[in-house]
Image (spheres, helix red, strand yellow):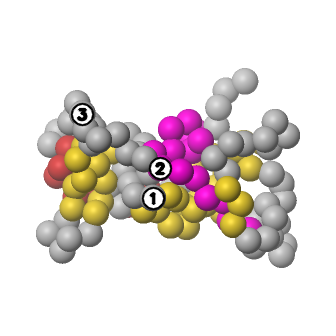
Amino acid sequence: MFPPDWTAVHRADGEQVGWLDATGGPRLLTGALLPAPAGDGVELLRAHGLAALDRRWWARLPAPLPPGVLPADEPKADWNWQPVVLVESSPTGCTVRPEWPAPGETGRALLPVPVGDLLLTEPPQG
């Protein structure tokens, strides 16, 4: 659940493109901070919010990912960080899949939003 002091940001056509946090920081639909230069958070999100989701992310998942949709809000100790791509993102959750799935690997993982440290822009060090 998003913090109550976050404000949804929409494009002119009504599609939500992100959030402004309590400090005015631009947040993606996943709740991750938009990596962008300082400026008007609303305009940054409208211009770059959806495009910023289209990239490599990192999540802790089992390998291989089982068929279907796996809740990944509490990673198991034997799950490793692996590169993923977003399949879908909404205010209620986001779905990821391995960036390079193994042959026949069709599973997806469901993460809560905001994702916090469950979805990273870079692999963790150490």
Q: Which residue is mark 3?
A: 22
Badge 1, how many Cα within 10 Å: few under 14, some, many 20+?
few
Regarding residue 52, the answer to whether it shows in the image is no
Q: Residue at x 81, y 64 (%)?
A: 66
Above or below, 66 against 29 in this view is below
Considering the numbered disc 1 on the image, is that residue within a helix, a strand or a loop? Answer: loop
Q: Are marks 2 and 3 in contact (CB under 8 Å)?
A: no
Q: Residue at x 29, y 60 (%)?
A: 17
Q: Which residue is mark 1?
A: 92
Please state the horizontal and vertical placement of residue 85, each as a whole percent of the image.
Answer: 59, 59
Residue 107 falls in which quadrant of the image? bottom right
Regarding residue 17, the answer to whether it shows in the image is yes
Q: Residue at x 19, y 65 (%)?
A: 11
Task: Please name whichever residue, 86 or 66, is drawn nearer the observer in this view of the structure.
Answer: 66
Disc 1 residue type?
Thr
Disc 3 residue type?
Ala
Q: Which residue is mark 2?
A: 113
Residue 76 falls in which quadrant of the image? top right
Among the two numbered marks 2 and 1 on one chain, the one whose residue lies closer to the N terminus: 1
Q: Are marks 2 and 1 in contact (CB under 8 Å)?
A: yes
Considering the numbered disc 2 on the image, is that residue within a helix, a strand or a loop? Answer: loop
